[in-house]
Image (tube, rainbow, N blue to C red):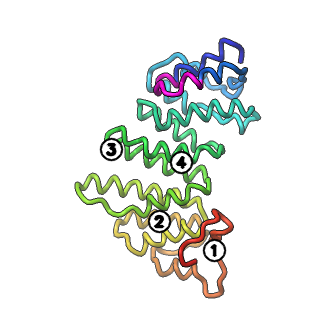
Amino acid sequence: MRLAARSLWLLPLACLGSSGCADFWDEVTARDFNIKAYYSAKPDPLVVLRDCTDGNKRAKALAALQEPAQHGGSVEEQDVVVKILLTAASQDRQPWCRQKAIATLARFKDPRVADGLRDAYYAAGSFSPEIATRLRCEALEALGSVGNASSVDFLVKVLREPPVEGAEQDKQQMTDERISAARALAHYNHYQATSALVDVLRSEQDIALRQTARDSLVSATGADLPPDAKAWDDLLHRPDGSAVVAQPKKFLGIVPVGW
């Protein structure tokens, strides 16, 4: 991009907050970028993010962003787009803008996305409980789509959260998050993931969570068994020692206690 196009990055980050924006602006304007070449959508999403403060239009622009690295872009172009989306996912003042940024990141292959989605999960607490739950569920399911191995521990941690004491609404919101974590684990054929899903079948009473755990086990292993913990235990711990899931040492380098 020429000089006029370099200004595209200032406004969206200013809308997200002033911390660190000056350094980012200095870095971006010091280089020539050709990011506009990746977008055929009208209006140009970068122009929208530069000029518009309307939340709906900015959400659509965030949804239209593509990953430069998947389209022959440079490292610098990749850094700019990833930083805009990661910042929007955890700092934008409009929840629907965060949601669109999270959904767009779910299509990215950049290794920074996994950490960014975890940040978005925790940052969602700045909204009302209902909106926060929705954003957290979006972030959890996006971690499944991204398929980054480093996300398994985090997803298992959310899935294993103990029941919430208190209002029924609070209990349901935690259950919704656990269902999203279980759904995300369908993308990970790994001991920690399948073990956590089987534990849900063993001890959980919620029908929706149990069904999601079973469906994720089917997706992860290719086996088709009912939502019965013993049946899955028998499959995953075959007497002949053969495995239907990846061994920890071959996947994350993490060996569960007692392995």
Quadrant of the frame with the C terminus = bottom right
Measured Cα–Cα span from mark 4 to mark 2: 17 Å
Earlier sequence position, callout 3 versus callout 1:
3
| Main secondary-structure element of the magenta-colored stretch | helix
Residues at circles 4 and 1 in contact by the CB criterion of under 8 Å? no
Q: Are marks 3 and 4 in contact (CB under 8 Å)?
A: no
The kind of secondary structure element at disc 2 is helix
Pointer 3 residue: 130
Q: Left or right? Give the position of 67 relative to 224.
A: right
Identify which residue is drawn at 59% across, 61% down.
188
Instruction: Note whether 64 is above or below 152 in the view shown.
Output: above
User: CA–CA distance between discs 4 and 1?
Assistant: 25 Å
Query: In the image as oriented, which residue stretches furthest toward the top?
Result: 4
Name the residue beneath numbered marker 4.
142
Mark 2 residue type = Ala
Residue 110 position, x and y percent, is 65, 43
- State which quarter of the image contains the N terminus: top right
The x, y position of residue 87, in whole percent, is: 52, 33
Q: Which residue is at the far bottom?
A: 239
Q: Which residue is mark 2?
A: 213
Q: Is residue 2 left or right of residue 103?
A: right
SS for dot 1: loop
Quarter of the figure with residue 220: bottom right
Q: Which labelled disc corresponds to residue 244? A: 1
Q: Of label 4 and label 2, which has the lower sequence position?
A: 4
Q: Comparing marks 3 and 2, which lies closer to the viewer? A: 3
Q: Residues within 10 Å of mark 1 (few under 14, many from 20)?
A: some
Residue type at tag 4: Ala
